[in-house]
Image (tube, grey):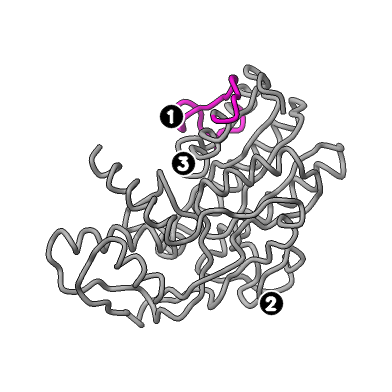
Amino acid sequence: MKKEDKVYVAGHNGMVGSSIVRKLEREGFTNIITRSSKELNLIDQAAVAAFFEETKPDYVFLAAAKVGGIQANNRYKGDFLYDNLMIQTNVIHAAHAHQVKKLLFLGSSCIYPKFAQQPISEDSLLTGTLEPTNEPYAIAKIAGIKLCDAFRDQYGVNFISAMPTNLYGPNDNYDLQNSHVLPAMIRKFHEAKLSGGKEVVIWGTGKPMREFLYVDDLAEACYFLMENYNDPGAINVGTGSDITIEDLAYLVKRIVGFEGELVFDTSKPDGTPKKQLDVSKINKLGWKAKIDLEKGIQLAYESFLNQAKK
């Protein structure tokens, strides 16, 4: 990519998209194209086609998606499947139709089977059944990977797919009804600390293992892949290490400064028992995550406090 190239970041108001924009700005890019969901409805195929005709981007980072945690995925299954299928299909098709030089499609580690061999390698895709609690989202993301590969095979386009692990950081969603586990913990512990609460309830047994990647590390990886990676199929992006939900809860508790007790609600679902990515492929290319979990949570909590002031 050249600094003057037109680079469209789809989903720039979200946690991932905003981090990619910050990375591009740090690198000196002067022609970053963005549109809010109010300005451009990515579910509207005609609107997306008209936008690409008007702006003619050279490169596309496709970070727009309808996202949420277990509760949101369970409650809005139809929306999660339909909205994500439409968003990615419209953008990928328009990128092909308007001769975009390269597109990076962002998926999720939930594309892999529930009981995939750990750590999960890229070739685990479609080798087993998915975790039911986020199956609609996963199916949409799998379709996105396959659409990029199909267009690559048929038309020779350079569309690539990156699969990040669980993300957190600045501009995260802290809504307790549809957020992911780490931002939900940050908010719960913070509010309990302010109110003098005696306990905080954590969903599930606390035994599942999860891997977490600070979003600015992901943005670095996306930029690295756009510059250095041109192969079909998915490539994993993560830290290569994981932690139990219980240990995570105690870590967040300490960083936030909550002094009460933890209660694990075992009537709530755990989700996938373990979900650690094999990141040897991207590591061999020359990229590794830099921000460790404790430092990342400290940064995320600072960001949460700043968001709460607005």
Tell whether label 2 touches label 3 (CB within 8 Å): no
The answer to whether residue 7 is above or below residue 152 is above
The kind of secondary structure the magenta stretch mainly shows is loop
Q: Which part of the image, by quadrant, shows the N terminus?
A: top right
In the displayed structure image, the side of residue 208 where residue 32 appears, left or right:
right
In the displayed structure image, the side of residue 167 where residue 122 appears, left or right:
right
Q: Position of residue 310 (x, y in %)?
A: 25, 37
**How far apart in space, not on screen, are marks 3 and 1 (Cα)?**
13 Å
Q: Quadrant of residue 261?
A: bottom left
In the displayed structure image, the side of residue 256 where residue 212 appears, left or right:
right
The residue indicated by pointer 3 is: 14
Q: Position of residue 6 (x, y in %)?
A: 65, 22
Is 57 a magenta residue?
no
The residue indicated by pointer 2 is: 117
Say which element carries label 1: loop
Magenta residues, as a range? 26-46
Say which element carries label 3: loop
The amino acid beneath tag 3 is Gly
Query: Toward the viewer: 157 or 49?
Result: 157
Mark 3 is surrounded, within 10 Å at the Cα level, by few (under 14), some (14 to 19) or many (20 or more) other residues, namely: some
Seen from this angle, which residue lies furthest left?
196
Query: Toward the viewer: 256 or 191?
Result: 256
Is 38 a magenta residue?
yes
The answer to whether residue 208 is above or below residue 133 is below
Say which element carries label 2: loop
Query: Toward the viewer: 263 or 243?
Result: 243
Q: Position of residue 43 (x, y in %)?
A: 55, 38
Q: Position of residue 211 (x, y in %)?
A: 53, 66
The residue indicated by pointer 1 is: 38
Q: Earlier in the sequence, mark 3 or mark 2?
A: 3
**How far apart in space, not on screen, are marks 3 and 2 (Cα)?**
31 Å
